[in-house]
Image (tube, grey):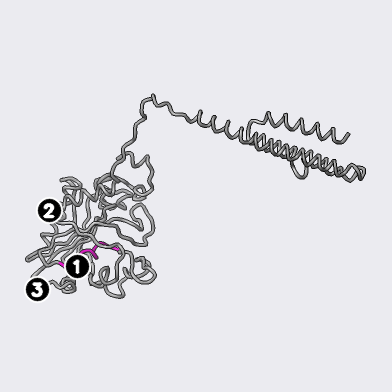
């Protein structure tokens, strides 16, 4: 009687297995018939203690044989289901090679690098060459050679990324000027574009990683008028002939006299807005005549040569040039913004 029930379970299990058409159905079948706790064969095995001693061994052997047969049938059916699912997936993912191509959307140069190349081209027309240097710097090239005192605030960890084991991430590409002057004698006329790093708080106009271009001209009889003429020519070519430029007295350790160059706000035309902090002007960068001690540090005779230097943010120039109100838009990689340019 009990063996007849086991045979019925086997036949029913095989019939249901043949109808299982997915991995989920196969899993449900396995739990229903082969599960250790609630499977039907397990329930039959639990009845062995109720049988007569002579019936227990042949009954257990019969149940185990049925279990092995069902497991073998399960393996065969699982392979068939996998093959069917793969065939269906290949059918759904098929490609009609006779359809016309969908085409590709061309990329374009990022705004910051477009602005960088435009700035370099402008200074090339003014006779400047391009110089490059390392982003990982030492304190001599980044600070000391530029006449920056040991107690200057820019040397604090709040303003500079220092690295374990020595060194720092350059805070300005002025370090490239020092490296260039160490190996070249005047006349010198270079610009040094590149990435710089400062632990700034992220705001609409500041970012801890940004791009800067520094300029340096050293020769005989160089004057502050040459500096103003160079930067005014740059501003007119970059922002338009009618855009106003102003120079404000300032201080930098490596230039004397020093100035800040501002350009009339392109967003409000000088009337005042959030971008220019309602001043009507946007600060472009610092400039000035190279301090004689800096020339001495690199082995250039300050009695014979004079020079001027300037530094501007490429990111900020891109913002003004393309009327981007927030510097964060340049680095968020939002295609809705980037596709406009």
> Which residue in the structure is indicated by mark 3?
303
* Mark 2 neighbour class, 10 Å CA radius: few under 14, some 14 to 19, many 20 or more: few
Q: Which residues are magenta?
A: 171-183
Is there CB contact under 8 Å for labels 3 and 1? Answer: no
* Mark 1 neighbour class, 10 Å CA radius: few under 14, some 14 to 19, many 20 or more: many
Q: Residue sitting at 34 percent across and 66 percent down?
A: 160
Q: Position of residue 9 (x, y in %)?
A: 79, 33
On residue 255, the disc is 1
Q: Is residue 297 magenta?
A: no
Q: Which residue appears farthest toward the bottom when viewing the image?
A: 150
Please tell me in which quadrant of the rendered image residue 199 appears.
bottom left
User: Please, is residue 130 above or below residue 152 in the view?
Assistant: above
The earlier-in-sequence mark between 3 and 2 is 2
Report helix, strand or loop for mark 3: loop
Q: Nearer the viewer, mark 2 or mark 1?
A: 2
Distance from the alpha carbon under mark 3 to that under mark 2: 26 Å
Q: Nearer the viewer, residue 85 or 198?
A: 85
Q: Position of residue 46 (x, y in %)?
A: 84, 44
């Amino acid at each position: 009687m009990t063996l007849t029930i086991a045979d019925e379970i086997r036949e029913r299990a095989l019939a249901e297995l043949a109808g299982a058409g997915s991995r989920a159905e196969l899993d449900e079948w396995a739990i229903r018939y082969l599960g250790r706790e609630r499977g039907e064969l397990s329930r039959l095995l639990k009845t062995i203690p109720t049988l007569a001693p002579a019936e227990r061994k042949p009954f257990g052997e019969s149940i185990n044989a049925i279990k092995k047969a069902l497991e073998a049938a399960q393996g065969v059916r699982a392979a068939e289901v996998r093959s069917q699912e793969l065939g269906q997936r290949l059918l759904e993912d098929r490609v009609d090679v006779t359809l016309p191509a969908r085409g590709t959307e061309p990329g374009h140069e990022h705004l910051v690098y477009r602005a960088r190349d435009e700035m370099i081209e402008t200074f090339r027309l003014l006779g400047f060459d391009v110089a490059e240097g390392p982003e990982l710097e030492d304190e001599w090239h980044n600070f000391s050679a530029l006449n920056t005192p040991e107690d200057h605030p820019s040397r604090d960890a709040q303003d500079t990324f220092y690295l374990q084991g020595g060194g720092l991430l350059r805070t300005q590409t002025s370090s490239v000027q020092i490296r260039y002057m160490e190996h070249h004698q005047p006349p010198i006329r270079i610009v040094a574009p590149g990435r710089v790093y400062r632990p700034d708080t992220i705001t609409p106009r500041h970012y801890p990683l940004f791009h800067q271009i520094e300029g340096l001209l050293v020769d005989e009889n160089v004057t502050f008028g040459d500096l103003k003429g160079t930067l005014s020519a740059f501003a007119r070519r970059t922002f338009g002939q009618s855009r106003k430029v102003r120079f404000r007295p300032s201080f930098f350790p490596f230039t004397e006299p020093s100035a800040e160059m501002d350009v009339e706000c392109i967003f409000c035309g000088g009337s005042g807005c959030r971008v220019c902090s309602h001043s009507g002007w946007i600060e472009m960068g610092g400039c000035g005549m190279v301090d004689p001690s800096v020339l001495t540090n690199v082995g250039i005779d300050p009695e014979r040569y004079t020079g001027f230097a300037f530094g501007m943010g490429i990111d900020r120039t891109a913002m003004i040039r393309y009327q981007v109100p927030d510097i964060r838009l340049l680095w968020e990689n939002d295609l809705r913004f980037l596709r406009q340019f």
